[in-house]
Image (tube, grey):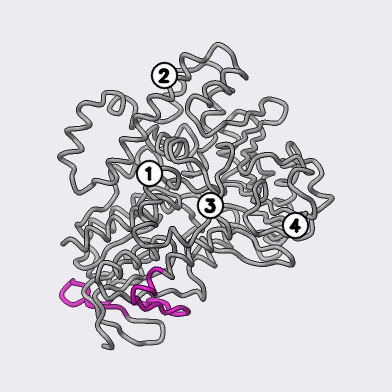
Amino acid sequence: MSVDYDVIVIGAGIAGLSAAATLQRGGKRTLLLEGHNVPGGAATSFVRGRFEFEVSLHQLGGIGGPGPLRAVLDEMDAMRKLQFVEDDELYRTVVPGILDVTVPADWQGAVEVIDAHYPGNRTKLTRFLEIVREVGLWQLAARANLHKMKEQAEWLSGLPNVRRYGLRSYRQVLDEFFVDERVKFVLSSYWSYNGQLPSRMSFMDMSRLLTIFMETKPYQIIGGSQALSSAMLDSFLAAGGEARFNTSAEKILTRSGTVTGVRLDSGESVASKLVVSNAPSLSTYRRMLDPADVPASVLRDLRSRRLGPSVALLYLGLDAPAADLGLTSATNFLTADLDERSVARGMRSLEPTPFLLASCYDIKPTGFAPVGASQVVLASMQYAAPWEALSDEEYAEAKTTFADSQLNLLKAIAPGVRDVIEEAEVATPLTIKRYLSQPGGSIYGFDQDVTDSWLFREDDLKPSVPGLFLIGNWTTAGGYQSAIVTAARLCKRLLAT
């Protein structure tokens, strides 16, 4: 084997960057491996014509006030290299002809706005959001203290609302509080940030999402997610870390079931007694390890889980300012009707999309679009299966047809978009699968429904294979904030052992 490292981190996605920077700055000689030629994984950008497109970041939580992401970025000295823009609202949610509500990033403000649209719900809205906040804050604190579960259990004993509501579905709790389906819909709009519809997502998980954005506000990054990835890489390199791009880890090497290093795609072997993998757990356990080294319990667990959803994306460079197009909010949820069963069917078919998230990065410019122009990205949650069943000819046609249906739905808030399209790029679950090496193109790892909560699954400092630790979207709740913060916390505990 070649040079011995204290730690090898596989994958320079945002969790891998967070882990590498934390470990190197903590005194561990760390090697970071990445098969692509740039850092970030999905946290990056690409250029078409006059436009630089944000690949995946819609809103960033955990930055405002004493946010957990701000604290992690401060600790790795990356925060000072970044500039942020606070969104004025949480989101705008629209069902054409039925509702159009813009929700502020403030608990009381949300009560006022929703009650103004649907009078008579103020008392219930206030109580419901109080419970959301209590449950959300508990989950955020509990996930920061997984190594102190006895203390967390004692705290939980004094939180009856967390015990009563936490593991019920979000929809069940909504039904207990509200009759008006429009109120329930407005309060459910963040479901796509976890990839699960309200009837399948735990109340605890939705509470975490609402709480992190209400408490620490939604932000955009000047320069987009690539600026974030580059800042974390710079932190790692400035501390003396070594990064190898265009270099993949082919095999995690072991001796007597314990990690000894990594074999690269070049054939070179690199020694280390500690490997942190930001690769999907399916790839890590089934492809990178010798089958004899993977406990049967791990394989059973993997077989019991379902791949989460991917996404179909339409990147639009528009030759007009956002305001001229009718776009007033950075984050817009558009849904064809109030029935979530329509969205559930759409996620598993190639029918015209019943849902999309339209992100406009030029309400307050983030540096991507030229002056007088704007960038909009349309995202529809999709499982990969219907795309994987297509022939090459069918696939090309399906991409165009599906993107056209996204534009049709966007007309509800920006009717003139088609007339000003300068650049358009389509990505499907197969694009995500190919470029990011994610099984099924999954953007959140496994399906994170009520039965697959982080509370039951999240790994602590107890590796299934001695010397191997997993991080990233396959091991924790979805989203940037969660991936970065959870990876940093795990690595800080590793440094303390």
Q: Earlier in the sequence, mark 2 or mark 4?
A: 2
Front-most of 25 and 342? 25
Q: What's under tag 3, amino acid-wise?
A: Phe
Q: Mark 3 and mark 1: span between their CA atoms?
A: 15 Å
Asked if the magenta segment contains residue 246, the reply would be: yes
Q: Write the residue at 40% across / 38% down.
A: 208
From the image, tell me which residue sits under label 1: 66
Front-most of 5 and 342? 5
Q: Write the residue at 74% across / 36% down.
A: 412
Label 1, residues with CA under 10 Å away: few <14, some 14-19, many ≥20: few
From the image, tell me which residue sits under label 3: 84
Q: Nearer the viewer, mark 2 or mark 3?
A: 3
Q: Is residue 1 found left or right of 336 in the rendered image?
A: left
Asked if the magenta segment contains residue 348, the reply would be: no
SS under mark 1 = loop
Q: What's under tag 4, amino acid-wise?
A: Val
- In the orientation shown, which residue stands out farthest toward the front? 80
Establish if 302 lies above or below 8. above
